[in-house]
């Protein structure tokens, strides 16, 4: 029996359990588990690509590229920079999964982009087989809040690498609430991976599954958008006057999640055009219905009331940034209630422009995690309006847990207005907390680099890392060179701490 025929037999047995439950997510998870077990069986005779001294290390980056998600794209860009800094250009070949190569065109230069099919287990089995290791690189790594399929893909890639005895690292992701089948997949197949997570909460989630994890961070902290004159042009064309207080808002479709497969809806959409408003891709649909619409409307209306009141009080200019293409609907709805605020979304603008806009703001109010992360190196105060645990974890790290509000708070308008005024009254201490957090997270990112070096050495002791890398050395040497503004901020932080001591 051929290898692929064997895989088909494995898959049919596993997938049947999922189909009996009439649950396409379970079927996908079962198929992924079958692929991993097939790879483990095959590896006794054929491990696929095996690294040889004197040749580049081939690593596969498994994540969420190709959707024009600014945060996902920025964190991967910075991960690539760190990897090249650690391994050296001559000793590294990187491949990246993308769901839409047209949307990721021009990003991730020097990296080979591979199109991820919607039904991916067989593709992953073969692709991981052709690499020396896998790095899972999406922030929302192990959680069911957004889409089980995404977490299944990353867990599957890690599990396949484990099955073939290859490098397997979850790099700076987050773990949250998982449906039982997904949690079982993670426990059964990813427990041997090096788990570098963004916070203690994620560590505890994985610990409950019996998986050791280490505190790391996100990888977007080193990002530098550069001067971005286009950001100034966009603001000027929209009517902003330099010196005027600038408030940038980043709303989302807060109640659309999770995305789940629904074959019946898919057929209905194909036959009649129904469900277009909640269609995500293929047979995957956002959560929808009158209750979702009512909750979203209340969130946007409360958001608008608070911002309008604050803008009038402070003669502030308000603009809206959509960090992912799907944020356009929420952004345009908020803009309408604000009387026509400008809206700039990632389907029209690259990440340098959007982050450049965020870093020109005096205040950022965001339901997007990476809008807060990417404006923090500019020491920009931000307030989060959250649908899950990511923004609260970040605000707690900054020492500002009170600045994480809830999308479903019926008094969100008052809470947001009060939070904006609280930041005004405590601006200096807020900025100090932001700077402390930025420096702390840069060091954690360096520590992740140390652990990655150690893991690669454990697999390949002859890999030609330069001297001074790995555990027991300086964590800061494991970061790519910091851009001047960020280096200055780190220096100011150190001087302040030395003066306080």
Image (cartoon, grey):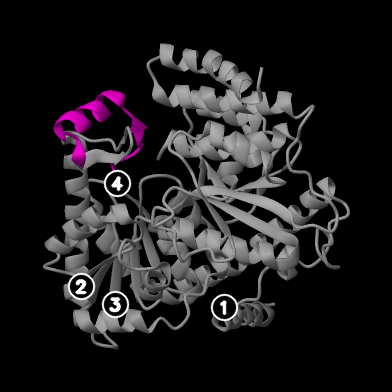
Assess whether residue 273 is covered by the magenta stretch.
Answer: yes
Q: Decide if residue 39 is on the left or right side of residue 107.
A: right
Q: CA distance from mark 4 to mark 3?
A: 24 Å
Q: Residue at x 60, y 20 (%)?
A: 5
Q: What label does residue 295 carry, if any?
A: none
Q: CA distance from mark 4 to mark 2?
A: 23 Å
Assess whether residue 399 is covered by the magenta stretch.
Answer: no
* Nearest to N terminus: mark 1 or mark 2: 2
Q: CA distance from mark 3 to mark 1?
A: 22 Å
Q: Decide if residue 262 is on the left or right side of residue 352.
A: left
Q: Position of residue 79 (x, y in %)?
A: 60, 60
Q: What label does residue 254 carry, if any?
A: 4
Q: Residue furthest bottom?
A: 242
Q: Which residue is mark 3?
A: 246
* Nearest to N terminus: mark 3 or mark 1: 3
Q: Position of residue 375 (x, y in %)?
A: 44, 70
Q: CA distance from mark 1 to mark 2?
A: 30 Å
Q: Which residue is mark 1?
A: 486
Q: Which residue is mark 2?
A: 311
Picture mark count:
4
Q: CA distance from mark 3 to mark 2?
A: 9 Å
User: Which quadrant of the view contains residue 337?
Assistant: bottom left
* Nearest to N terminus: mark 1 or mark 4: 4
Residue 144 in view of the camera: no
Q: Residue at x 78, y 51 (%)?
A: 456
């Amino acid at each position: 029996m051929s290898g692929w025929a064997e895989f088909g037999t494995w898959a049919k047995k596993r997938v049947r359990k999922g189909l009996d439950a009439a649950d396409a997510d379970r079927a996908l998870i079962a198929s992924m588990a079958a692929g991993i077990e097939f790879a483990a069986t095959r590896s006794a005779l054929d491990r696929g690509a095996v690294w040889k001294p004197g040749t580049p290390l081939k690593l596969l980056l498994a994540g969420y590229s190709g959707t024009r998600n600014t945060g996902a794209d920025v964190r991967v860009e910075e991960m690539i920079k760190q990897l090249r800094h650690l391994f050296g250009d001559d000793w590294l070949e990187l491949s990246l999964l993308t769901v839409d190569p047209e949307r990721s065109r021009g990003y991730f230069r020097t990296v080979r982009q591979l199109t991820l099919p919607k039904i991916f287990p067989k593709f992953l089995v073969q692709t991981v087989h052709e690499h020396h290791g896998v790095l899972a690189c999406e922030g929302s790594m192990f959680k069911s809040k957004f889409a089980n399929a995404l977490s299944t893909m990353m867990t599957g890639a890690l599990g396949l690498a484990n099955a073939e005895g290859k490098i397997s690292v979850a790099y700076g992701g987050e773990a949250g609430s998982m449906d039982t089948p997904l949690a079982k997949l993670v426990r059964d197949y990813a427990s041997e991976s090096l788990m570098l997570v963004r916070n203690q909460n994620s560590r505890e989630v994985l610990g409950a599954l019996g998986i050791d994890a280490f505190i790391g961070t996100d990888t977007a902290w080193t990002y530098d958008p550069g001067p971005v004159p286009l950001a100034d042009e966009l603001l000027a064309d929209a009517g902003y006057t330099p010196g005027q207080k600038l408030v940038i808002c980043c709303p989302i479709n807060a109640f659309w999640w999770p995305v789940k497969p629904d074959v019946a809806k898919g057929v209905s959409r194909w036959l009649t055009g129904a469900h277009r408003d909640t269609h995500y891709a293929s047979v995957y649909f956002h959560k929808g219905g009158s209750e979702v619409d009512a909750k979203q409307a209340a969130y946007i209306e409360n958001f608008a009331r608070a911002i309008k009141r604050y803008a009038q009080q402070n003669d502030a200019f308000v603009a809206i940034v959509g960090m992912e293409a799907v944020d356009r609907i929420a952004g345009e709805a908020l803009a309408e209630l604000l009387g026509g605020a400008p809206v700039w979304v990632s389907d029209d603008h690259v990440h340098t422009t959007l982050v450049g806009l965020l870093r020109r703001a005096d205040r950022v109010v965001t339901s997007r995690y990476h809008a807060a992360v990417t404006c923090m190196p500019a020491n920009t105060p931000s307030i989060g309006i959250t649908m899950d645990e990511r923004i609260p974890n970040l605000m707690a790290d900054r020492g500002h847990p009170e600045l994480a509000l809830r999308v479903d708070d019926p008094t969100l308008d008052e809470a947001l207005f009060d939070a904006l005024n609280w930041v005004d009254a405590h601006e200096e201490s807020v900025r100090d907390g932001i700077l402390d957090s930025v420096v702390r997270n840069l060091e954690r990112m360096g520590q992740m680099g140390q652990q990655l070096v150690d893991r690669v050495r454990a697999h390949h002791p002859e890999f030609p890392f330069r001297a001074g890398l790995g555990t027991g050395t300086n964590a800061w040497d494991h970061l790519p060179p910091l851009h001047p503004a960020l280096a200055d901020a780190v220096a100011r932080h150190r001087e302040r701490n030395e003066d306080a001591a």
